[in-house]
Amino acid sequence: MSERPLDIDGLELGSLTKKGKPVETRLKDVNSALSIFNTLLRADERSAVNRARVDAMFDGAAPYNTSSLAVSGQQLKTNLNFGDAQRLLDISLSAYVDLYSSLERLIEVKGTQGEASEIKPAEEIVAEELTHLIRGWPEFHNAYLRLCTTFIKHGVGVAYFDSPDDWRFRVGGFTDILIPRQTPTNEECIDVAIGRRNYLLHELYAYIKNPAAATKVGWNVEEVKRVITKNATTSGRADNYEAMQAEMKNNDLHTGIQNPSVKILHYWIKEMDGSVSHYISAEDSPKEFLYKKVSRYEKAEQAYVMFTYGVGSNGTYHSIRGLGQRIFAHVQTSNRLRCQQIDGAMLASAVMIQPENQRSLDELQFTYYGAYAVLSPNVSIIEKAIPNLGTAVQPALQDLTQQLALNTDTVSTYGPQQGSPYRNQMQVVSDMDVATRLSGASLNLFYASWNRLLREVVRRVVTTKKPDPAIKDFYERCAARGIPPEFIKSLDVARTKAVRSIGNGSHANRMVALRELQGISGQFDDVGRRNLTRDIVSTRVGHDLADRYVPANVDKRPTVDQKIAFFENQQLMGGQSVPVVGNELHGTHLGVHLPELAQLIEQLNVGEADPQQVLPTLQAFYEHISQTVQLAAGDVTLEGAVGAAQQLLQFTEEAINNTTKALQKIQRDQAKQGADAGEEGAPPQQDPKMMEHQVKMQIAQEKAELDMAIKQKKHEQEMALRDAKAALEFREGSEF
């Protein structure tokens, strides 16, 4: 059992019935939901103020309150934000951006169908197309940046799914997602999470555009209509839902502009069995839930994923401090010291004048005469020593800079030391590592959450029944590369994980690591060395241009079964019988045997092979491939290979029969000629060239008959393929 949040008892959540049985759902009604929301909102008020102050610092707010300076007569006091906070944020953010931008594939997936030699290439293709799907989402880059910015600044960021079926996630922080305080840092320990989001009226209407389908999946169509009508401010349409509906159906821009957004609340409630229910309501005076689906998700990570900047002081989400809290006091003090330094410099460069009386002050004027000036009477120049503030300020600023570096140890701000003639390569590498890397703790925390988020994205892509052009395009691209939908739907989603970047978020570290690999590349095989070369090129010019120099689609390493199949081909070519073992990779073997057999039949048909010599070879291949087809027929992933093998076996059988008949006819003709010659005397000598000509003529005749049969088989196959394609398109249309 997970640890319970300490303040969960103050919330209106059920647990057990009077009979001691778990309740069907812990959230009683919409009024209880709204009460929980208001409780969590009040508990977060002080934290919200602190987050606002931190955001203001990053946004360039001045260290002194401008109004307070004006009231005290200090309007001219230097009041500048020198951008230290934003600079540190940019350094941290750049490391996290490198973690995904440096990768060719974001995801690693695991297949469950097919042979081992075929699964790996299929997994790579699916991973590439999933990466294309995610990066092709126009909002992905911005969403990723907002997510990283939020958890870096405030310690916690949240990626959540506001739609039950959509794979596209939204991001926010504790301003957008409320959870009970004292909740342990684990999604499965969160009993209730409430997301706040503004919806335009047409966005809300899109969920109930088809009322019957919307009701089936959990939407309260009448409540959604009420909320839309209540928030409509378009002239003459506020009390007329039908008119509003007509405008929204027509995608009327006027409707979207004239009407304000609607504040909507998402409730994710952890039930007693560990599942998560999803509720949606209006924030302002709700009467019923807009959406309700009890136990919608098996676990919390299917609804939201928490990203943290650390572990906190007591293991709770609200104890985690982001970069903003860590550097706030130092940055504010640094800004004020720099402001004082500027004020001191301006004061030191100014001329101090003291009038004798008020009248002298009022009549004060300067008269310039070239390189000199004349003051009005009754004033005097005051010679006064001004303290050198730089002497006192600079040491303090240097110390603050060092403290800031220590407080931002997740991304070091130290740079390489310069000017030392005794520095060796390892020292330079060490400096580079310190200057640019993410710490191991921060990296592991990020990837733990990033793995969960990408896993949920893949799960939704694989299982969704919602019509989605992007997902349909993904399946079509996979099919064009030979990956059937069955393979994708059979993925082991639980084993999906993010691909880790080389260099811990640092381009310099990545080059150092690749350079070290170059030193031992002599121990790699050809494929390994080529992969290393491609990684180096990609690091220099990017993945988009890497194909210009080192194409990615190179031949894969031959597997053990491929090598065995090549050896079997040599035996079969000699007419030897080769048994088939049940645990072989049958698809791999067929991929090696079929091209060899097809080439042999082609040589026979054009007269380039001796029929008498090739016949045992054909029989050996036929027997071996037939056994392989029998064992591979039950594997759905090998349907294509099995079909091709069966068709080639038919041609082989016909070639064997035709060749056998031709040889038998030649033998009969020779026997007849011998008998005739015996009656007349000594048998005539047979011309070998004439015999070869007769065999070729016989084969040519049989080939003509075979060509007609092939054309008929091809026609039948094309008709079958068209029927299968039509059935597949119908099935995919029903799924999407």
Image (spheres, grey):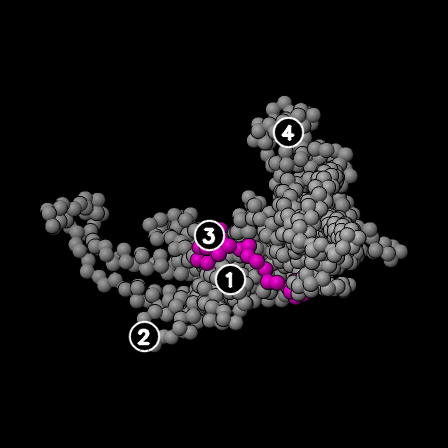
Q: CA distance from mark 3 to mark 4?
A: 48 Å
Which residue is identified by label 4?
248
SS of the residue under disc 3: loop
Q: CA distance from mark 3 to mark 1?
A: 14 Å
List the single residue furthest toward the right: 19
SS of the residue under disc 1: helix
Q: Earlier in the sequence, mark 1 or mark 2?
A: 2
> Within the magenta stretch, is there residue 541?
yes
Decide: marks 1, 2 in contact (CB < 8 A)? no
Which residue is identified by label 3?
548
Front residue (pair 663, 679): 679
Q: Earlier in the sequence, mark 3 or mark 2?
A: 2
Tell me the mark number nearer the camera, choosing from 1 and 4. Answer: 1
- Segment colored magenta: 537-564
Query: Residue 407's x, y, as percent?
Result: 48, 66
| Viewport quadrant of the C terminus | top right
Measuring 64% from the left and 65% from the top, which residue is drawn there? 563
| Kind of residue at disc 1 | Arg
Query: Residue 669's x, y, as percent?
Result: 76, 50
Front residue (pair 686, 141): 686
Q: Is residue 403 visible?
A: no
Q: Earlier in the sequence, mark 3 or mark 1?
A: 1
Which residue is identified by label 1?
530
List the single residue furthest toward the bottom: 422
